[in-house]
Image (cartoon, rainbow, N blue to C red):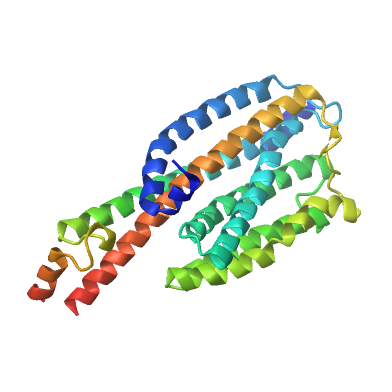
């Protein structure tokens, strides 16, 4: 099937219906394998067992940012190419991204208390992540406020592209400012994490990414169906009036 | 001793992850059921999508006549 065929919502639904059960199964297996690796991973020589929080916190942070990147691509698709599924993809990603950003903040807070002695500081990394979560809430509120999906899509797309400025701020906050949060552990030159911890972390990151893809496809399917219901109700109302 | 002291934070993090992920899965599944039910109800009333018919289909004409 050519990629352009996915622009047709009916074809997309057909593909999603076939892919979601398989993706769900692979996600469950990836999580089971990842968690078994996490249980076997050693404690950190300084942090002790609290390093186990890393296997949730880091993938949640990555996914929180990735979901906004997906929304930004959708926003471009809406504003530039008017792709029929672009705003569906952007709208469907927002609650999922918000959930991952919230999970990142909660697990970070629970990790910070034993390591830093506090649940929260107004440090650049933490604050920019909180801003991302608030931006998610703003986009979701905007989608719910404007009744017409095409008008809501344009407004949400502009807010999404403006909010995308926060992504590099989150990423480079630990380099640009003196923060309590640790510095970058991954780079083009390699990782500062020892392989016995890095491998479980990467497996959990793959599991979280698969979860995001599965949930996003399912949420997109729901959004397409919701728009069909809306269109049919409008047709019914116009036929009766 | 340190591991026991930190256990609530580790368990709390995994519990939070479970709640968030279970919540997302429940939201997606319940929403899917709700949309399917709404579509089925509309189709029972004789409505079809515009793309499923050619322009205003015969069922819509019937609905207009009834109105």
- In this view, the residue farthest toward the top is A40
Q: How many marks?
A: 0
The one nearer the camera, B3 or A183, is: A183
- In this view, the residue farthest toward the left is B66
Q: Residue at x 62, y 64 (%)?
A: A160
- In this view, the residue farthest toward the bottom is A241
Is residue B27 visible from the viewing direction of this image?
A: no
- In this view, the residue farthest toward the right is A178
Is residue A160 visible from the viewing direction of this image?
A: yes
The one nearer the camera, B41 or B58, is: B58
The one nearer the camera, A79 or A42, is: A79
Residue A158 at x, y = what percent?
61, 69
Q: Quadrant of residue A238?
A: bottom left
Please state, as top left, top right, bottom left or bottom right, where the C terminus of chain A lies in the image.
Answer: bottom left
Instruction: Give the answer, above or below, for where A208 lies relative to A137.
Output: above
Residue A52 at x, y = what percent?
71, 31
Please state, as top left, top right, bottom left or bottom right, where the N terminus of chain A lies in the image.
Answer: top left
Q: Quadrant of residue B45?
A: bottom left
Query: In the image, is A178 to the left or to the right of A67?
Result: right
Q: Residue at x 49, y 44 (%)?
A: A215
The one nearer the camera, A111 or A75, is: A75
Q: Residue at x 32, y 48 (%)?
A: B33
Q: Residue at x 32, y 53 (%)?
A: B34
Instruction: Give the answer, above or below, for where B53 lies relative to B63.
Output: above
Residue A106 at x, y = what percent?
66, 48
Residue A91 at x, y = what percent?
51, 59
Instruction: Give the answer, above or below, for where B3 lies relative to A20.
Output: above
């Amino acid at each position: 099937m050519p990629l352009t065929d996915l622009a047709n919502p009916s074809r997309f639904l057909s593909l999603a219906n076939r892919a979601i059960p398989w993706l769900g199964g692979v996600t469950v297996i990836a999580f089971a394998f990842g968690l078994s690796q996490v249980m076997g991973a050693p404690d950190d020589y300084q942090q002790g067992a609290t390093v186990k929080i890393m296997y949730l916190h880091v993938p949640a942070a990555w996914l929180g940012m990735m979901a906004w990147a997906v929304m930004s691509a959708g926003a471009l698709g809406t504003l530039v190419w008017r792709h029929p599924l672009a705003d569906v993809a952007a709208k469907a990603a927002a609650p999922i991204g918000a959930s991952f950003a919230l999970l990142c903040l909660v697990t970070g807070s629970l990790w910070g208390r034993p390591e830093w002695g506090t649940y929260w500081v107004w440090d650049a990394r933490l604050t920019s992540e909180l801003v991302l979560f608030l931006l998610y809430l703003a986009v979701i509120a905007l989608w719910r406020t404007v009744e017409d999906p095409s008008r809501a899509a344009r407004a949400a797309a502009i807010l999404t592209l403006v909010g995308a400025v926060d992504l590099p701020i989150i990423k480079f906050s630990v380099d640009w400012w003196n923060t309590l949060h640790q510095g970058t552990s991954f780079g083009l030159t390699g990782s500062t994490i020892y392989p016995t911890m890095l491998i479980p972390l990467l497996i959990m990151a793959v599991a979280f990414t698969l979860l995001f893809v599965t949930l996003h496809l399912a949420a997109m399917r729901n959004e397409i169906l919701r728009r069909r219901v809306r269109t049919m109700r409008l047709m019914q109302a116009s036929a009766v009036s | 001793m340190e591991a026991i002291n930190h256990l609530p934070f580790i368990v709390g993090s995994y519990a939070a992850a479970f709640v968030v992920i279970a919540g997302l899965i429940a939201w997606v599944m319940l929403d899917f059921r709700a949309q399917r039910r709404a579509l089925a109800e509309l189709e029972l009333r004789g409505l079809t999508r515009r793309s499923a018919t050619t322009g205003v289909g015969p069922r819509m004409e019937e609905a207009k006549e009834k109105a």
